[in-house]
Image (cartoon, rainbow, N blue to C red):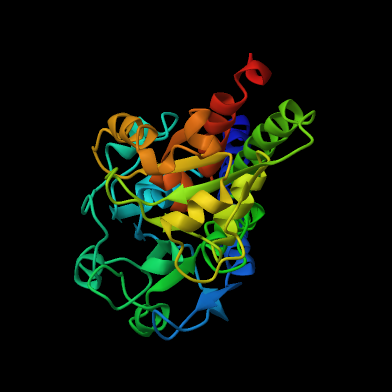
Amino acid sequence: MKKTLLLGTALFVALSLTGCASSNNNASEKSGAQAYYPLTIQNYSRTDEGASWEKKDQVFDRAPERIMANTRPAAELLLHLGLGDKIVGVGANFGVPDPSVEAQYAKLNILSDDYVGKEVTLGTNPDFVFGRSGLFADAEWGVGTVDALNGMKIKTYVLESSIPGGTYNSIYKDIENIGKIFDVKEDADRFTKELKDKQASISAKLEGIQDHKTFAYLHTNDPNELYVYPASEESFFNDAFAMIKLDNVFVNEKGDVSVETLIAQDPDILILPQWDDTDLKKVREEIYVNPKLSSMKAIKNKQIYIVDYNYLFGYSYNTIDGMEQLAKEIYPALFK
């Protein structure tokens, strides 16, 4: 009888201690979340499409639960950080896919193959809108301005890589900030290391190249309409090409560039963007036989390269994949 009483008492004490431990753990977890949030992240806003970007803090009382990504590359970045279950909509579904997250991306709610407007964006009931800066506008192709979205209690994050002055290194800051906002630092650190390792590998292969080549960007998919885009204010774009020792021949050009000026500048390489299903290989061949361009080095040496539009103007991590692909085409012997 005494033995049974002692056993019952011991069991009661053990259960009591277990309950206390569980209660303390829950309290500790709750306390940890409260200690982490609210979190302030410095980001950006502008009043309208033509205005300058200004610093604006975003304050998070908790991690957002419903993310609208305004482009495919923006959504793919989130997938690399394990946030796929929080993505409620993706706009601008175009460009070459990232094979490492392609299966996850296929399960997302794709809103449109084109840029989406504010009404479609709000239709996903987001509490966080994320992505390329130029799409934070009240135009029919824009998701709404930062201030307008914030006024509706929707948090925002404009990729620092996509605002004037942004570079490829800005991507690392973006990944760090998203890691903080969603409290996924380990995933952010892992992905950053992966990208930096790839960047270092490319640099090592090109280390022996002393002289940079020059290039010009032809924003066209029609060989009869050659539009030269100087991209002089596209800091991310120009920095990405510098990564593989290519310099924009029109980096200081502020106005329109004529075909005559292109011929006179005579860059080593011409870049064609792939943004739709146009057969750009055929377009390239027609440009090669354009008699007006016959004196150019890029024409004589068959140096026109096709690059996916998102690698150029997605302002995201996957630009490094496009630059690596381009470097392999220009310097195949260095990547064997």
* In the displayed structure image, the side of residue 259 where residue 3 appears, left or right: right
Report x, y in % for residue 277.
23, 37
* In the displayed structure image, the side of residue 274 where residue 307 appears, left or right: right
Q: Is residue 177 visible to us here?
A: yes
How many numbered marks appear?
A: 0
* In the displayed structure image, the side of residue 104 where residue 251 appears, left or right: right
Q: Which one is in front, 67 or 299?
A: 299
Report x, y in % for residue 93.
28, 47
Q: Residue at x 42, y 62 (%)?
A: 130
Query: Where, by quadrant of the figure, is residue 135 drawn?
Result: bottom left
Q: Look at the picture and state if 276 lies above or below 126.
A: above
Q: Residue at x 29, y 43 (%)?
A: 223
Q: Residue at x 34, y 75 (%)?
A: 137
Report x, y in % for residue 262.
49, 53
Q: Which one is in front, 34 or 185?
A: 185
Report x, y in % for residue 69.
36, 57
Quadrant of the drawing holding the N terminus: top right
Q: Residue furthest top?
A: 336
Query: Where, by quadrant of the figure, is residue 4 drawn?
Result: top right
Query: Where, by quadrant of the figure, is residue 55 drawn?
Result: bottom right
Q: Look at the picture and state if 121 lies above or below 85.
A: below
Q: Which one is in front, 48 or 83?
A: 48
Q: Is residue 316 visible to us here?
A: no
Quadrant of the drawing holding the C terminus: top right
